[in-house]
Image (cartoon, rainbow, N blue to C red):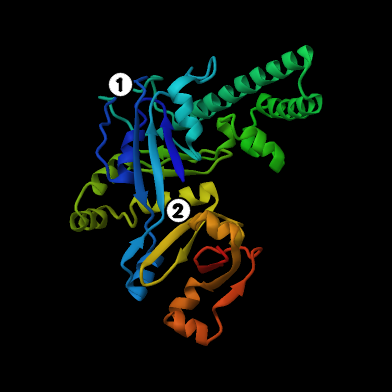
Amino acid sequence: MKLGIIGLPQSGKTTIFNALTRGNAPTTASAGRFEVHTAVVEVPDPRVTRLSEMFKPKKTIYAKVTYADIAGLETGSARSGIAGQLLNQLAQMDGFILVARGFEDDSVLHTMGSIDPGRDADVMLSELLLNDLIAVERKLERLTEERKKGGTDKVENERQTALFQRLHAALSENTPLRKVEVSAEEDKILASFGLLTRKPVLIVFNMGEGQTAPVWEFETPSVVLQGKLEMEIAQLSPEDAAVFMQEYGIEELSLSRMIRLSYDLLQVQSFFTVGEDEVRAWETPRGATAQEAAGAVHTDLQRGFVRAEVVAYDELISLGGMNEAKAKGRLRLEGKEYIVKDGDIVHIRSSL
């Protein structure tokens, strides 16, 4: 799971990155410079901690999420289509965290001359949309040239032309492509194009200490954070952080909150495998079958899938352990079409 943090220069996106990752990446990079800071963060999950206490394994492995602070996207970036290293980085992301500046700071001037988080979010979303519109128009031009020259698969050309015309119509109406329904076959066609508005977006309004944020309405989810304050807390020792949070009435750091929002954004969930050797959290899309979830553990388990032994986390904890779950008949045998639930403890039986 990889999320790109984007925003206008001086929006505080590196500050948000540091708060999320407990990092200390420099927050004074020059506007327009292409830089990427990346960090892998463990997903804080008390269920993994509790399972580790119960099974006392040799290893405990939490799920992980990668955050990438991507510089270089600003007003006008997509005028001719985003290209090069920047597009390559953006295309690799599973989704975006878009940081819009709401804080006042006379020593850090806004590149657009005034503070307006709603406007800034609109600008960034428009850049992504314009990039896709240009990419789709270029693809339609190539399809037209191929059709005129002949020698290509006429049926496939017509199929792709209809698809990209549909995408063009949506983008022309300022509709992001994540709102356009496509078939599984069409999804495979589009997978290699790196269209940016197909990816989900979470908007972070980065406010100053004590500021309250107006309500902005967007088609994508949003959250309000005090980035600088949270970065400072994230860099303290756990003891000092607890005192600081109590003083400022902060119940939860952005790390835990944003991880949950990231999961919601990408529509993923966690299931667990347990034992004496290892307790581990695995990520799988919501709605995944037991056979598909087995593939997250190992491709051989998916190919040789026979059955899955499943017990819900809450049931396992309330019963006191795996032996008790078996004795009470709560450890179920499920087939390959079983839909894995968030928090399921799963043991895969495989023929390989």
Residue 86 is marked as none
Residue 260 is marked as 2
Counting from the top left corner in percent of width and height, residue 102 is at: 38, 34
Q: Nearer the viewer, residue 304 or 147?
A: 304
Task: Give yes or no for contact between labels 2 and 1 (Cβ–Cβ under 8 Å).
Answer: no
Q: Is residue 343 visible?
A: yes
Q: Residue at x 77, y 30 (%)?
A: 159
Residue farthest toward the bottom in the current orientation of the protein: 327
The earlier-in-sequence mark between 2 and 1 is 1
- Give, as a three-letter code, the residue at label 2: Arg
Q: Is residue 244 left or right of residue 148?
A: left
Binning the other alpha carbons within 10 Å of mark 1 as few (below 14), some (14 to 19) or many (20 upward) gives: few
Label 1 sits on residue:
30
Q: Residue at x 79, y 15 (%)?
A: 150
Binning the other alpha carbons within 10 Å of mark 2 as few (below 14), some (14 to 19) or many (20 upward) gives: some
Tell me the distance, in whole angstroms, between the alpha carbons under discs 2 and 1.
31 Å
Quadrant housing the C terminus: bottom right
Q: Is residue 99 visible?
A: no
Against 333, residue 15 (above or below) is above
Residue farthest toward the front in the current orientation of the protein: 352
- Give, as a three-letter code, the residue at label 1: Ser
Counting from the top left corner in percent of width and height, residue 94 is at: 50, 40
Q: Is residue 230 left or right of residue 352?
A: left
Q: Residue at x 43, y 29 (%)?
A: 116
Q: Nearer the viewer, residue 138 or 176?
A: 138
Q: Nearer the viewer, residue 178 or 277?
A: 277
